[in-house]
Amino acid sequence: MKRGGCFCPFSINLNLRIMKNMAKSILFCLFCLVSISSMSQQMNIYSDFPGGNILIDKIKGDTIWVRPDLRDTEGDWFYWYFAVSNAEGRKLTFVFNKPNQFTKMGASISTDGAKSWQWQGGDAVEKNRFTYQFASNSEVRFSMGIPYTQENFDSFMKQFKGNRWMWQSALCQTKKGRTAELVKIKNPFKVPNMKVLVTARNHACEMMGDYLMEGIILEVMNNAWLKENVEFVFLPFMDKDGVEDGDQGKNRLPRDHNRDYSEISVHETTAALRKMEPLWSENKLKIALDLHCPWIKNVDNEHIFLTGSDNKEMERKQLVFSDILEKNKKSELTYFTSGMALSGKLDWNDPKKSLPKGDSFQKWSAKIPGVDMTTTIEFPYSYNSGQVISAQNAVDFGKDVAHAMELYLKQLEK
Ligand SMILES: [Zn+2]
């Protein structure tokens, strides 16, 4: 009965079905798709789907020791996403090998093939572990966040098929042959005076940026003034390969995508954007916005905030935009300018520390001729000043961001 060599009592077999990056791995069970058989049923634990990420260190009875696959990440990070099926009646405990692998809301769980997600709750996490009782053999997905991959984006974009205000094309092909999407919203009847650039997933694991982007797109398509007067370019997956492969992305070696905006870019998407931008913007780019998620712990990260620029004039404009957002926001998630990560306020946005690694999107875009305001929104994975974040309220907040852009751009026009 024993085939995989795991410590599995009760004649549970471990049967490796798929192994990714086997040569790199020195792990006990390797990672990815693992099948465990018992006398009565076969349970599967796997991550061989878009965005999937898990390493399995050990299985003993109903306890499974796991950890995120850091791959080419410098230092530690926390993104993981896996599925379990054929586990009816079992109560499995997943033990992570270290702290800081969960947000305040604990594991995120989907029982409908990643269409919708519910937080298990922070109270369910004890000593880096959580337990789940399986009611049926159907697949259950688990993640530290609310995953968003190309499949989500394709599904979202279907509603705009044939719409003459919207064009979908490609920024470029990635190293692994995938298409990095580019969406343009443009008045088909008039040349606009203003342009806006919005990017997400410069850090692959920071999926909430794409929920925000959906909200921004929805509001723009529903907002007569923005559609009439502003041309938008949206780049939903700056690290497309990382998103689909389930990479951390943050602190990627040899270069983090969000440090790849100076000298010679090593990534296809950042290189393509830097090449496209001068041709496209024509001195009309007014706002450049990059969407991120902060780290998962500490009160400094558990609220929505803008990242301040070390250029004081730029930071002043960011504060103006932030005040507009705070005062005109309609959706349920709270937002306060007082929570902004002003330059030098926190250790991680000390400009002296990030410079040697290369320019971020924000720093690069601030140098684009004609640009007025460039900033980063840091949107938490699960928790915003006492409020629980969902896919829907993230989309709704994105609509507020687009509305704030409208008001900000109208001020510029005066
Ligand atoms: Zn980031």
Image (cartoon, rainbow, N blue to C red):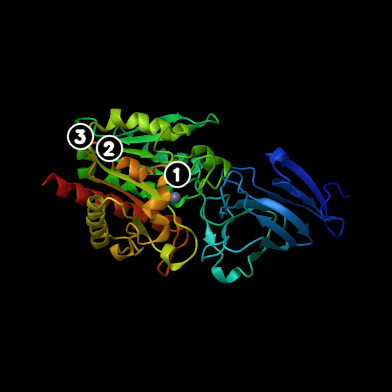
Q: What element carries label 2?
A: loop
Is 322 on the left or on the right of 92, as rendered?
A: left
Q: What element carries label 3?
A: loop
Is 222 on the left or on the right of 414, as rendered?
A: right
Q: Residue at left 75%, top 62%?
A: 62
The one of 212 and 157 positioned closer to us in this rendering: 212
In the image, is the residue at mark 1 within 8 Å of ligand 1 by its beta carbon?
A: no
The one of 347 and 399 positioned closer to us in this rendering: 347
Residue 404 marker: none
Residue 322 makes an appearance in the image? yes
Q: In this view, does 363 lie above or below 124?
A: above
Please identify, in this view, whether the residue under mark 2 or under mark 1 is nearer the observer.
1
Residue 368 marker: 2
Q: Where is residue 31 in the image (x, y as percent from the top left)?
A: 70, 46
Rendering quarter of residue 198: top left
Asked if the residue at tag 3 contacts the one at tag 2, i.e. Cβ–Cβ closer than 8 Å, the answer is: no
Asked if the residue at tag 3 contacts the one at tag 1, i.e. Cβ–Cβ closer than 8 Å, the answer is: no
Q: Position of residue 323 (x, y in %)?
A: 24, 60
The one of 398 and 294 positioned closer to us in this rendering: 294
Residue 357 marker: 1
> Alpha-carbon distance for marks 2 and 3?
18 Å
Q: Residue at left 34%, top 29%?
A: 276
Is 77 on the left or on the right of 166, as rendered?
A: right
Q: Mark 3 points at which residue?
A: 192
